[in-house]
Image (cartoon, rainbow, N blue to C red):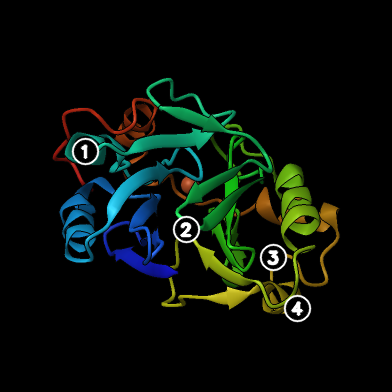
Amino acid sequence: MIFRQLFDQDTWTYTYLIADPETKEAALVDPVIEQVERDWKLIQELGLNLKYCLETHIHADHITGTGKLRELTACQGIVPEQATAECADRKIRDREVVKVGNIEIEAIATPGHTSCHTAYLVNGNHLLTGDALFIRGCGRTDFQLGNPGVQYDSITQRLFTLPDATLVYPGHDYRGHTVSTIGEEKQLNPRFAGHTREQFIELMNNLNLPNPKKIMEAVPANSVCGKVAKSTSAS
Ligand SMILES: [Fe+2]
């Protein structure tokens, strides 16, 4: 399997390129509009055929690159079943599997950060956790129908029940981490380790985080798969 973790420094976002080296079929998960040129160049260099762009959720902090990539390629945009993005070519249900060559990408519904959030398990061992679970952290739950109790249940019942050796690849990292494991996060993630559901809810309800700087443009733009005139106000 070709598996690449790509980073957008402006929004601390990870995009993942997954491809079957034999059939050359490829998928991108959570592409960022400003990085479409980089991603498209890499896809061409590796001789890949982009089949899908998948979103883990409707993002509030960056605009998706899916709209632009659909114009450049014949790829399909896939969003979680509950996402309000009628522009998508396909919606994916919990436990549904998308095939990229011989690679299987399984959707795992993990609401909480947003009501539609979905993680993707690649070939049973690479878990793309989006903004549900971060390395030693987790996604916020204070907008887009976020719910800390639901987030706790998704992570403890759907993700922490996967084998300890499962690799954790988050949708963002703010401290320079790149990969972890389910076993490591169960033991060391300070949002969860030693915390009851009630304690987690209390903690999440008192984070008092500022809104993402691009929220006003990103959410509406992502509801139309990123296919809008791009604002110049980045900060
Ligand atoms: Fe998010």
Say which element carries label 2: loop
Of residues 93 and 190, the one nearer the viewer is 93
Quarter where residue 231 is shown: top left
The residue to which callout 4 is attached is: 187
- x and y percentages locating residue 47 in the rendered image: 22, 61
Q: Residue at x 62, y 38 (%)?
A: 146
Q: Is residue 118 above or below residue 74?
A: below
Q: With 163 as the anchor, is 13 left or right in this view?
A: left
- Name the N-terminal-most of marks 2 and 1: 1
Task: Name the secondary structure under disc 4.
Answer: helix
Q: Which residue is mark 2?
A: 171
Which residue is painted at 68% across and 79% down in the image? 184
Q: Amino acid at mark 1?
A: Lys
Of tags 1 and 4, the one toward the viewer is 1
- What label sits on residue 68 in the rendered view? 1
The structure residue drawn at horizontal position 45% and vertical position 67%, both measured from the top left corner, is 173
Q: CA distance from mark 2 to mark 3?
A: 17 Å
Q: Is mark 2 within 8 Å of ligand 1?
A: yes
List the residue tagged with mark 3: 191
Q: CA distance from mark 1 to mark 4?
A: 40 Å
Q: Earlier in the sequence, mark 1 or mark 3?
A: 1
